[in-house]
Image (cartoon, helix red, strand yellow):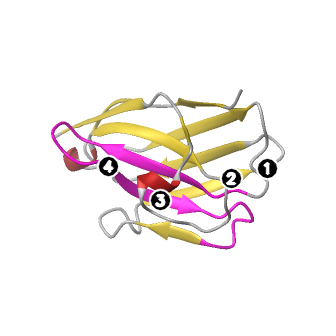
Amino acid sequence: QVQLVESGGGLVQSGDSLKLSCAASGRTFDNSAMAWFRQAPGKVRECVAAISRSGNSTYYAYNVKGRFTISSDSAKNTVYLQMNSLKPEDTGTYYCAGRDGVATLIAAKFYQYWGQGTQVTVSS
């Protein structure tokens, strides 16, 4: 059984940083793309960052580019999201997702594996 477990969320102030972690178990994602999605109340779940398993290809949503960094550690089967200069609009539940494929796709429908989510709240 595949499990993705996120951690690292919390309540921070505008301008602060957080680092989210996503630990995978049950299988390795050596040939899979991984991504972080965010869902704010009343809004559609959006992909904020994605990475190919090799790490050679990454995607960032326009509103986080330059502030967020996605990375992976294959030895630990873990994906990270470093979030700097956080803004109140970054508030939401952050989900880690994995897919059976190497392409860094950004639509949620292409991801088969999901974590339970971790809450990030940024106060102004």
Magenta stretch in the rendered image = 32-57
Q: What type is the residue that disc 4 sits on?
A: Leu
Mark-to-mark CA distance, 4 and 1: 27 Å
Q: Residue 74 carries which label?
A: 1
Q: What type is the residue that disc 2 sits on?
A: Ser
Query: Where in the figure is residue 32, as x and y percent of width and height?
Result: 69, 56
In which quadrant is the C terminus drawn? top left
Q: Mark 4 points at which residue?
A: 86
Q: Mark 3 points at which residue?
A: 49
* Residue furthest out toward the right: 75
Q: Do the residues labelled 3 and 2 touch (CB within 8 Å)?
A: no
Q: What type is the residue that disc 3 sits on?
A: Ala
Q: In this view, does 100 lie to the left or right of 68?
A: right
Q: Name the residue under label 2.
A: 72
Query: Where in the figure is residue 101, as x and y percent of width and height?
Result: 67, 61
Among the 4 quarters of the image, the one containing residue 102: bottom right
Among the 4 quarters of the image, the one containing residue 10: top left
